[in-house]
Structures are given as structure tokens and as C-alpha cells.
Image: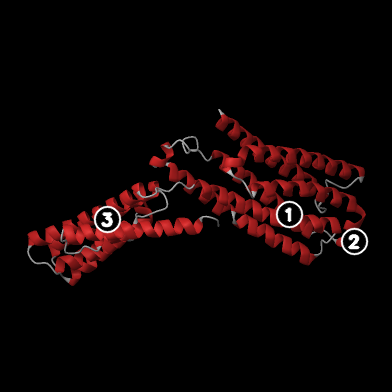
Amino acid sequence: MPGHERHTVLLVGKSVVAAALAWFVAHDVLHARSPAFAPFSAVLIMNVTLYESLRQAALYVGAVAIGVAVQAGIGFVAGPRLLAFVLLATITLVIERWPVLRSQRAQVSTAAFFAFATYVTTSGAEQRAAQLGWIVVLVLLGCAIGVAINLFVAPPLRYRSAEYAIQSLAAAVDGLLRELVPALREGRLDGQETQRLAELALRAEGLIAQARSAVETAQQSVWLNPRRFLPRHRARTSFDRYRSVINALERVTYQLSSLVRALRQWEEPESLPYRNLLNRYADFLDDVDGMMRVLAEIDEDALAAQSSRLVDLADRAGAERRRVAEQADADHLPLSDPDRPYGILVVEASRIMEELRNTCDALLAATRADNH
């Protein structure tokens, strides 16, 4: 994916800076007994978005505080005995079933075990209490440094990630249509061909969840991000247009999958008398593919021109869809027969056209809003 390597390198670089700074403060400035807690925490909560970094930091600090608190309670009552460790493990592992801490649940027992190790290697009640407190302090320090580095060192704005996700999904649908259109025109609807088409449709379906995740990550990257107030980003704080496009692409993908499943039930001898319908349908899908190729190159900076191009292609596709329906009527095809695919083809063409129209409307509305 374009830009992925750059984001990865940036995230690794910021993690290194955060870890080094956290170690320096914990080891050289504070002279902490267990300074590794600080850089570990800084790296653990480093994320591609500021919002997620803060959320993970809050969950992580909460998990560590709970683990240390449980150890403090058990340790000062039962002492550094094996039975105390068994009780500690039991309680913290039960707490980890608590869904509130989400991805940081496992840190409850981890923090408790480290706290127990610190407790048994330290003598004196005051010294033990101080060392357990230092664990929480170092974790807070590491999280604070990690969030600060993520905030002040190239805070991420993932606008392009949303575009790349849509481009990848549209390109997958384009790949399916590039194979489907000639198969319809040439009447290549045997089992091997339709199986290959079904695999392409399945591959496109697999990209839908990735596209949604990328758009949500892009939206999160705006929250709490100071770069959003810069003039070039001030108007780009919503990703509703991309959600609309993905919703439409999702339904188009499923409709094409339904179409392919119908074709897999098509017997070749029966298809030959209805070659005109197949040719009309291929013309319709060819125009749909033209729209997919535009979406496969979607660019925020060129959205106005691309939206106009999509509208033109949608008008052409709409005309071809009407010809599909007219051809089905002219050939007196049994559209209501559930054992034949003709009705499914006509219905799916209408549904695909409706989704593409909705996509054009969403993008046109977005470009008008940007202009105002």
C-alpha cells in the first residue's frame, strides 16, 4: 500500500525516540531502581493515532495500577510466600476477564508479577511501598513521554490511508469486472471460469473490512491532533464521504458475488439462445468497471473532476442497464423462474446502478460543501 512504509518508519522512529528519552529520565535523572518500565510503557502505547495512544495509555496505566494494588494488599498481609504468589496470580487472572481494560487486560497480572518480584527483593515496609509506587510512577512517565512524542513529533494525519483503502477495494472490484466482462461476451460460463470469478469476488469481499478499518483510523487521526487546525487541513475533518463510498462498494461487491453465483448455475447449452442479453450485460458492466477505475485512483485533491467523471460514467451505465431490461423483455426471458439466472441478472443490475448513483451523489455533495 502506498505510504505504508513511510508510516511504519515514522512510527518506529518515534518509538525509538520515546524509549530513549524515557530511559534517560528514569535512569539518569530519577535514578530509578527499575528504569525499564518507562521505555517499555512509552513504546507499548505508541500508536498511529493520538486518540488511540491516549486510550491505550489510560487502559495500560489502569491495568498496572490494579496489578500493583493487588500485590500491595496481598504482600503486606501474607508476605513474600509462595502461597501469596498463588493468591496473587489467581486474583489478577480473574480480573483480566474484566472486559473494561480491553487489549491491556493481560498487563494486570504482568504488573502484579513484576511488583511481586520487586517486593520480595526489597526489605522493610516503607522501602517496599516506595518501590511499588515507583512502578506506577515509571509507567506514568513512560506513557506521558510516549504521548508527548506522538503529539509533537509529526502527529499523524491519515487522510491518504482512507484513500488508499478505497483505491485497493475498487481495484479488486475492477479486477473482477475485467474478467467477468469478456467471459459474458464470449459465453465462457463453464464451471472452471465461474469458479475463478467466484474467487476474485471473494478476494474483493475480503478487503471490505480493511477499508472500513482504514477509514476509522483516519478519522481517529484527526481527533486531538493539532495539525487539524492548519489551513490546509481545516476543512478535512470528516470522512463521511469515504464511508459512503465504501458502503456502496461493499454492496456492489456482494451484488457481483450474487451475480457470479447465479452464473455458476448456468448451463452452457441453455445460455447460447440468450447471447444478446449477455452482450448487453457485458456493456453495462464495462461502464461500471470504468467507474471502478476512477475510484481506484480517488484523490482528495482531484475529487471535483473525478466526481464529474463518475457522473458521466453513471449516466452511460444507467442507459446500458435500461437496455439490459429491454433486451430481457424482447427475448421474453423467464425472469420470474427461480431456477434460471435471468431475473437475478436484471435485478442485480438495478441494485448496482442504485449504489453507484448514491456514490456519485455523496461525492458531489462533498465537493460542493468543500467549495463553500
Measured in 3D between alpha carbons, the distance from the residue under mark 1 to the one under mark 3, in whole angstroms, is 51 Å
Point out the residue furthest to the top here. 372
Point out the image quarter for the C terminus.
top right
N-term mark: 1 or 3: 3
Q: Secondary structure at mark 3?
A: helix
Amino acid on which disc 1 is placed? Leu
Query: In the visual, does 279 lie left or right of 96?
Result: right
Dot 3: few (<14), some (14–19), or many (≥20) neighbours within 10 Å?
many
Q: Residue at x 23, y 68 (%)?
A: 86
Residue 177 image label? 1
Q: Secondary structure at mark 1?
A: helix
Residue 226 in sight in this render: yes
Measured in 3D between alpha carbons, the distance from the residue under mark 3 to the one under mark 2, in whole angstroms, is 71 Å
N-term mark: 3 or 2: 3
Q: Secondary structure at mark 2?
A: helix
x and y percent of residue 36 in the render?
Answer: 24, 64
Residue 269 image label? 2
Quick check: marks 1 and 3 in contact, CB under 8 Å?
no
Q: Residue at x 28, y 63 (%)?
A: 110
Q: How many marks?
A: 3
